[in-house]
Image (spheres, rainbow, N blue to C red):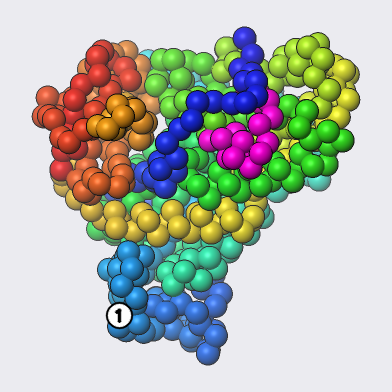
Amino acid sequence: MLHVRPAPGPAPRNLSRLSLSRTYAIRSSSVGGRTGLCLGHCCRCKPLSCKCKLGWSSQQPPDSRQHFRPCSSASEAVLTAQSDIRKLFVANEKIGVLLLNLGGPETLDDVQPFLFNLFADPDIIRLPRAFRFLQKPLAQFISVARAPKSKEGYASIGGGSPLRQITDAQGEALMEALCGKDIPAKVYVGMRYWHPFTEEAIEQIKRDGITKLVVLPLYPQFSISTSGSSLRLLESIFREDEYLVNMQHTVIPSWYQREGYIKAMATLIEKELFKFPKPQKVMIFFSAHGVPLAYVEEAGDPYKAEMEECVDLIMEELEKRGMPNPCTLAYQSRVGPVEWLKPYTDETIIALGQRGVQSLLAVPISFVSEHIETLEEIDVEYKELALQSGIKHWGRVPALGCEPTFISDLADAVIESLPYVGAMAVSNLEARQIIYVQVSTTHESCGTVQHIFCSCLIPGDMHRGRVKTCRSTSMYGLPTVQGLDSSFFLATDETTPLLAEHNCYQHHCIKGAGKPQIGRYAG
Ligand SMILES: C=CC1=C(C)c2cc3[nH]c(cc4nc(cc5[nH]c(cc1n2)c(C)c5CCC(=O)O)C(CCC(=O)O)=C4C)c(C)c3C=C
Ligand SMILES: [Fe+2]
């Protein structure tokens, strides 16, 4: 079935949630000793040109620790909410932002080992516990078998993935944007499957003596297979490391609903629409990277729900701008024999052609950099398929990359998360069992139920079977919703009975708990 929404679009939504962000904390752990990567210094902190009111010194001494010396007094701060945050969290602190991303092979020789790393990840190939010993042999087998096809793809886009360069540029831009907002911070890039690996970034963070860390996966929507996997790795790194145990941190697990991101996407779409002969007739075709269906249906991955909501928000923004175009959401890039999220992009393109759609604008929606699946799969394969299927006019929206509104919004997301950095004591989290929960708020005045966040992390094994039997310790959701204090919502088997009425908030267990219950945020 096609997920096609004709004009004029979805029911009106309360857009106040656009300002919501979500933060989580990770438990701490240990790390191997590799060289790390960081993106350098606060660009504006040059003598006499430093715009960071509470920023680093204008000097750049060889000892990186000195880069964090506050360079002005609190009296410079204006008494606004943001400047209060600055006063509280910037002075005498060394703030780090860790961007998490997938990573990609930089040369054709990297392709097979990169694929091995990817398939060896139990969040990518989810084997039952009893078969875990097969993970690496299987990864070896699949990576060798897939490498020739993947190499062809990477060869056709210049011999390697552009992901590292783009992510580095985003990190530089984010650092500049933070500095421009008077938050001096160092930005680090930690990739999941290729250099610079997350472990390398963490080593650099330790060497730099970061005291407050914001972890920001560069995936707008959360999936177990992407942000979840990276956060799980980070959690295992943090677990036994003395330094990391004491380093205050927070995580922004997804940010697809942020106003700046939505507006930046709408602007990119708008610009491309006007390249068509009849912009109002163009079908906006959102193509998201797929995940196996079982992730959503069995493991409770919020990816599909977040994706659909994200598309709705972008379409609402376009409607507000006078572009009530029809739109479709489909899922691409499936791998292997199992069923993935549907509708599939290729089948949808064919069906749209058969239905007489003349103009299609492809929008890559699950990733904010150009990569093999935009440059090869969409630009070459799907374009060809569309033209063969009778579609006359084809266009593609570029990935956000370093688009200024987007980067500025990421900087705001980091700043908004600062009050939550370190709010969670690691010791409180021992022996908790985590389940998936979806947290919603019900507006007393109108009765509207509004989705707030979906807690997700997650050792993968806990997704199997009934929630009540899960054994893993892991994620803790921290909703950063206006009107809530910074106490934590710990969705655990143990805390579930403790949840009691609290204002108008409800929690729903996605799996296992049946009926929605009135809950409270347990601090
Ligand atoms: C939100 C984005 C992504 C999701 C979800 C995702 C899930 C997922 N991916 C694979 C298998 C492969 N992915 C590959 C590359 C790749 N994947 C993403 C993003 C998501 N993956 C990106 C951005 C990239 C490209 C990186 C680059 O080098 O440019 C690949 C390798 C390429 C290929 O051979 O096709 C594989 C394989 C699975 C199995 C999965 C969910 C379980
Ligand atoms: Fe992928």
Residue sitting farthest toward the bottom: 48
Residue at 32 percent across and 64 percent down: it is 81
Asked if residue 389 is positioned above or below residue 310 in the image, the reply reads above
Which corner quadrant of the image does residue 149 belong to? top right
- Quarter of the figure that contains the C terminus: top left
Q: Count the labels in the image.
A: 1
Indicate if the residue with disc 1 has its beta carbon within 8 Å of ligand 1: no
Residue at 41 percent across and 51 percent down: it is 215
**Residue 8, how many percent across, how many down?**
62, 26
Asked if residue 184 is positioned above or below residue 167 in the image, the reply reads below
Tell which of 387 and 8 is nearer to you: 8
Query: In the figure, is residue 400 to the left or right of 376?
Result: left
**Residue 448, how many percent across, how many down?**
34, 28
Which corner quadrant of the image does residue 430 belong to? top left
- Quarter of the figure that contains the N terminus: top right
- The answer to if 38 sits in the magenta stretch is no
Residue at 48 percent across and 59 percent down: it is 411
Query: In the figure, is residue 437 to the left or right of 215?
Result: left
Q: Is residue 201 visible?
A: no
Asked if residue 409 is positioned above or below residue 15 in the image, the reply reads below
Query: In the figure, is residue 411 to the left or right of 406?
Result: left
Question: Magenta segment range?
Answer: 313-329
Residue at 53 percent across and 59 percent down: it is 408
Q: Is residue 452 visible?
A: yes
**Residue 353, how many percent across, how many down?**
81, 16
Label 1 sits on residue: 74
| Label 1 Cα crowd, 10 Å radius (few <14 / some 14-19 / many 20+) | some
Amino acid bearing label 1: Ala
**Residue 497, how many percent across, how many down?**
12, 24
Q: Secondary structure at mark 1?
A: helix
Query: In the figure, is residue 491 to the left or right of 212?
Result: left
